[in-house]
Amino acid sequence: MKKYFFYLRTMAVVAGLVFLLIHGGVVFGQEANNADLELRDQNLLKTGEKKKRFERRKGMVLENIGKRLALLNNFESCIKSANFREDLKSCRNTNKKGREALRAEIRGMREKMREKREKRREGRQWN
């Protein structure tokens, strides 16, 4: 029975300390100086930039999906309107050329992003 009360008392003390630490953090947080406020503002700017970058990437992905859908819709309509084997071949070739062009475009965008990333990394190394 003594062990039970010892453990119970220990848990109460630990819970009290955790409460004081959490509450103390709030009190100390209210006494922030200008350096802390500037750092917080910089972090807010970084999160704003991250949101903009995310939205830009999201737009690019949606645009690429739209292009793929357009290619597939054109391919589907071409196949549906085909009457002979040669028509099917020409539909496939046209679709293939469109896919290759889209891949090349995406590959080019990736290369640009890779170059930007490398420039940022080089800039960080010298700072």
Image: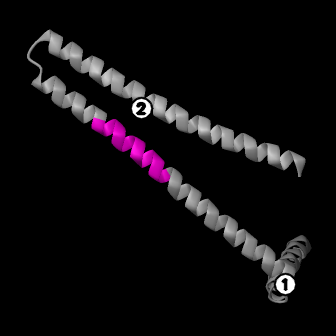
Quarter in which the N terminus is drawn: bottom right
Disc 1 or 2, which lies upstream in sequence? 1
Specify the label residue 85 is tagged with: none
Q: Which residue is mark 2?
A: 102
Residue 8 location, quadrant: bottom right
Q: Which residue is mark 1?
A: 34
Identify which residue is drawn at 57% across, 37% down: 110
Identify which residue is drawn at 41% across, 24% down: 100
Q: Nearer the viewer, residue 28 or 6?
A: 28
Magenta range is 58-70
The percent coordinates of residue 105 (x first, y second) are 47, 34
Does the magenta-highlighted stretch encompass residue 73?
no
The percent coordinates of residue 93 (x first, y second) are 29, 17
In the rendered image of this protein, does residue 15 appear above or below residue 74? below
In the rendered image of this protein, does residue 41 appear above or below residue 93? below
Q: CA distance from mark 1 to mark 2?
A: 51 Å
Identify which residue is drawn at 73% across, 40% down: 118
Q: Is residue 103 left or right of residue 48?
A: left
Identify which residue is drawn at 54% across, 38% down: 109
